[in-house]
Amino acid sequence: MKKYAFGADIGGTTVKLGLFTVEGELLDKWEIPTRTGGEYDILQDVADSCREKMEQKGLSADTFAGIGIGVPGPVREDGSVDVCVNLGWGKKQVRDEMAAALGMAVAVANDANVAALGEMWQGGGKGYENVVMVTLGTGVGGGIIVGGKVISGAHGYGGEIGHMCINTHETEYCNCGKKGCLEQYASATGIVRMAKKALAASEEDTVLRRADSLTAKDVLDAAKFGDAFAVRLTEEFCRRLARGLSFISCVTDPDIFVIGGGVSKAGEIITKTVEKHFADFVFGSQKDTKFGLAILGNDAGIYGCAKLIIENA
């Protein structure tokens, strides 16, 4: 009987690892450095670390459903990637290489998708099977789950919600090379960009003019304290985010949007304001779609990785 599973969330700096029961209890978690370069094999490092953990715990490989792996790039259905820039990978058959290194079943998915799966399983989306995870950080990421299954698409780009065009009149370029992407308005950098443009176009008094180095947190904190200028900026940021999420809702009709990432630490000022504007863009029962905050933090990825292999075992 399979009792355990490993989750490995591979990032550009560290690999986060977790040992789970198949029921979803996190028994142990740890990190190893992500060693890149021709002389290193990240997957072998992960396999060695997992074997060491099994020895420490007195566990045998035949009691494991396997290992789920999250990687920072699009993943094809066969568990391969075309490129993971942050890991120095070109085309790589991650699933087969990991299976050979560790000797157990392997499932692979994009890191944002596994974070969404983790939040659905044991986090802010627990109790729902149709969940969209939205990550608001330096950029805007996402993961889409329908019927309990991650939607990754034909090329592994499912859930790349930050690069949907929500403003065809935008004149500035997004980092992806397009114009008018959701990321240009709803990310931490996007909020600061909008704030600086608004400040330059107005002489209105606001505490934001006295910020040493303006951040998204400054804008959202000022809005919480009632600064009129910051309140309007927050309304605009949330309205644009709500519009983007309404596009997704028309296609996937989720039970809940779970909002995570650094910007989400502002809390309900985001979820409540987005929810208000979202109702203006959708129809029918979609107006009842719930909005919540991610609760697993940096552990969402390892939870999702474990769930990924458990459901595929």
Image (cartoon, helix red, strand yellow):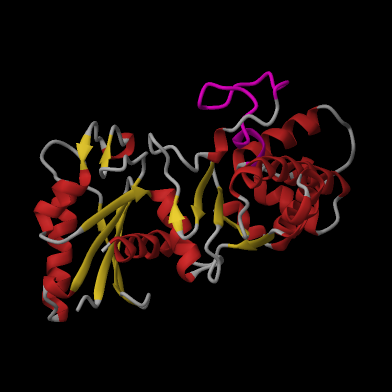
Residue 241 in percent (x, y) is at 69, 43
Location of residue 187 with respect to 126 vertically, above or below: above
Between 43 and 60, the residue placed more toward the observer is: 60
Report the front residue among 230 and 254. 254
Name the residue located 61 percent from the left edge and 43 percent from the top edge.
251
Q: Is residue 303 magenta?
A: no
64 with respect to 252 (left or right): left
Q: Answer whether residue 183 is magenta in the image.
A: yes
Q: Can residue 213 be seen in this view?
A: no
- Residue at position x 23%, y 32% from top? 91
Q: Give the range drawn in magenta.
A: 168-186
Q: Main secondary structure of the magenta part?
A: loop
Q: Where is residue 79 in the image (x, y as percent from the top left)?
A: 26, 45
- Relative height, residue 222 to residue 86 (above, below): below
Can residue 162 be seen at all in this image of the molecule? yes
Up-down: is 219 above or below 53?
above
